[in-house]
Image (spheres, coloured by chain):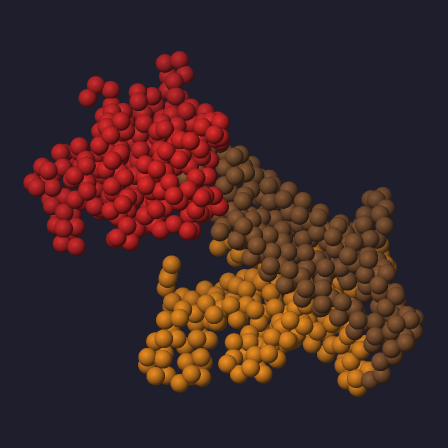
Amino acid sequence: MDWQWDFTFEVVLPRLWEAAGVTVYATVMSFLFALLGGLILMLLKTSRFRLVSFVAGEVIEFIRATPLLVQIFFLFFVLPQFGILLPPLTTGILAISIYNSALTAEVYRAGLQSVPRGQWEAAKALNIPTHRVYQRIIIPQSLPPIIPALGNYLVAIFKETPLLSFVAVGEIMHASKLIGSQYYRFTEAVTIAGIFFLVLSLISAVGIRAVERYVNKRILH
Amino acid sequence: MTDPKIRFEKVTKRYGALVVLDQLQFEVAEGEVVTIIGPSGSGKTTVLRVLMTLEPIQDGIIWVGGEPLNKMWSGDRLVPASEAHIRSVRSRIGMVFQNFNLFPHMTALENCIEAPVQSLKLPKSEAVERAVELLEMVGLDDKRSHYPSQLSGGQQQRVAIARALAMRPKIILFDEPTSALDPEMVGEVLTVIRELASAHSYTILLVTHQMGFAREISNRVCFFDQGRIVEQGEPGRLFESPRNERLKLFLSKILQA
Amino acid sequence: MTVRIAAIAALTAFLVGLAVATFSELRVFLPALLRGAVVTIKISVLSAFLFWAMAFVTGIGRLSKIRPIRWTCAVYIEVFRGTSLLVILFWFFFVLPEFGVLLSATAAAVLGVGLNFGAYGAEVVRGAVAAVPQGQREAAVALNIPKHRYMLRVIIPQAIPVTIPGLSNLTIEMIKATALVSAVTLVDITFASVQQNQIHYRTLDIFLVTLMLYYCFAQFVRFGGAMLEERMTRHLGKVH
């Protein structure tokens, strides 16, 4: 094994640092869109119209049963054929958002279902209007399971962003690959990329646990 | 009985093939305290749940204070009730659940003002004033800023009673209010219910296994079996000289336990 | 049972699609995709065995009373859960040779995928073992059964059926994750469809077939998992 420290400091770290910005940007944007998309899919799936809820359910199932990478390639190749020309980063964020929307939809649904039926019954017996029941009784109580689950998906999305290197988005994995093919040295770049993901994931895990405790204490006492 | 407060007219409730209420005829007069007893699965809790509109009925009409609950007048015809109609009739009924069903993310006081503010549109100050009075009445004014998880079962159930009363119902339904409680906490809840019953301003329907209590506070006891009232009457008579065989069997089992 | 219906529907749709494809112009890219599918299946099966084995060994090791075992398992789980699979694959294939360990593409892919999902599976196994009621342990102590015996004969047999839904979900995730193995020069379905797309420019057809194939694999695993769970829990009766 030979690890070259000057190569690490002069070439690898500056380039990975730049690429880390793209990774973080892609993660945050994908997460925000997935939060919104999941909400829409969940509402469609719980729609009163059978056809709408059936189609939404099947779409969710199909998205979940197929690999994100294939979906990224599919959007990347198919959108231009319909005249939609987007930068690779935008296409990538779109694909990750759609994929994770199908997953967050399930988080929302499970969270709402975790609220005991007795809460609905008590609210109904007290004649509280339906939208108020959601706003004041159901949604606050569904947050303790939902928030940590969404936090886990934030970390999952973060770990999915390296897939964007397959369509030449300049995130951290792509930068490592480029360094590798340019200097015929993978060791430093790939190892540092791995440590970057590991450290941020571990920090996030601790953060999620703290948020989980806080939300539980704050809402359910 | 001139104008019964509650009237079930041939009410049928089914879960799939299982008939829970079988063409039930049942009346409760204004100010009356009626206890419903019966073996599990006899439909006694279902009577309260359909009256509270927690579950739909398949056939029949329920009348509350002379107004249909599950139907409404359209000219002189009865049509299925709209949500607004159900809400207006339902506002006269309050319910206390076996498992309390307090809102865990709200304090005792917040539990008692939530519905008056959201549903009756009372100003918050007025709702708080009334809630404090009710918490005092159930002996919990010192616990008003406690959360349900910080209260004992008996205390939670007393908050739940105050919460139901905060909506100023005319009719109160108690669904096995002491079944989920440890034995030493049953007394404090029964004391509160006893007070309400002796006030005579409420019509009360109670489902319970506490036969002594039923006998003490009820004007009438109804024995349910297989979705029907098999026998009913003044509590002293019903408990001392039951006529129906199944009631005799039921009472002997309960009294042995 | 909805799973059964979904699986049968998916399989039928796939076979009809295949028949149509064989007798149409789709013939030009289908053989390449199916060759890719064979690679995907091969990597999936090999990785799955590694994944399940690691899940049980480290999931149970994580609960060991012996500190070095417990810590080794914990480090393995955190490291392989914390990094991205693609980075792991690259590391195994391009960096390990620097340390004198030369892996074939298949070996790197199987190790990467298997070890990554083994770490996720360990959490499932740990949860299942922890979920065995305390009373079972107490009964074993009361009957004076030796510790390692009751772990093997009482706890683990009860934990296995509980792990099946979680592990079958992870197995589906794992098959999807094999789409990344082109990073180590393997030509699986995903990479085959990218190549075929570059040759024939029939993006919709090619990728729909690819997505359908993955969908069928997923339904197949879900179906198998549900059957296995039914078989293993049949004699337990309805507890709830």
Residue pictured at 59% horizontal, 79% vertical: C71
Q: Residue A207 in the image: state x and y as whole percent.
A: 64, 60
Vertical placement of residue B207 versus B153, above or below: above
Q: Is residue C224 among the parts visible in the rendering? A: no
In the image, which lettered chain appears brown? A
Residue pictured at 17% horizontal, 32% vertical: B219
Q: Is residue A176 among the parts visible in the rendering? A: yes
Q: Residue C34 in the image: state x and y as whole percent.
A: 73, 65
Q: Left or right: where does residue B43 sit relative to residue A162?
A: left
Q: Residue A174 in the image: state x and y as whole percent.
A: 84, 64
Q: Left or right: where does residue C179 sit relative to residue B157?
A: right
Residue pictured at 27% horizontal, 29% vertical: B203
Q: Residue A151 in the image: state x and y as whole percent.
A: 64, 56
**A17 and C97: which is toward the camera:** A17
Vertical placement of residue A121 versus C153, above or below: above
In the image, which lettered chain appears orange? C
**B4 and A48: which is toward the camera:** B4
Extreme top residue here?
B75
Residue A182 location, quadrant: bottom right
Vertical placement of residue A219 versus C123, above or below: above
Q: Quadrant of the N terminus of chain A?
A: bottom right
Q: Left or right: where does residue A144 sit relative to residue C141?
A: right
Q: Colour of chain B?
A: red
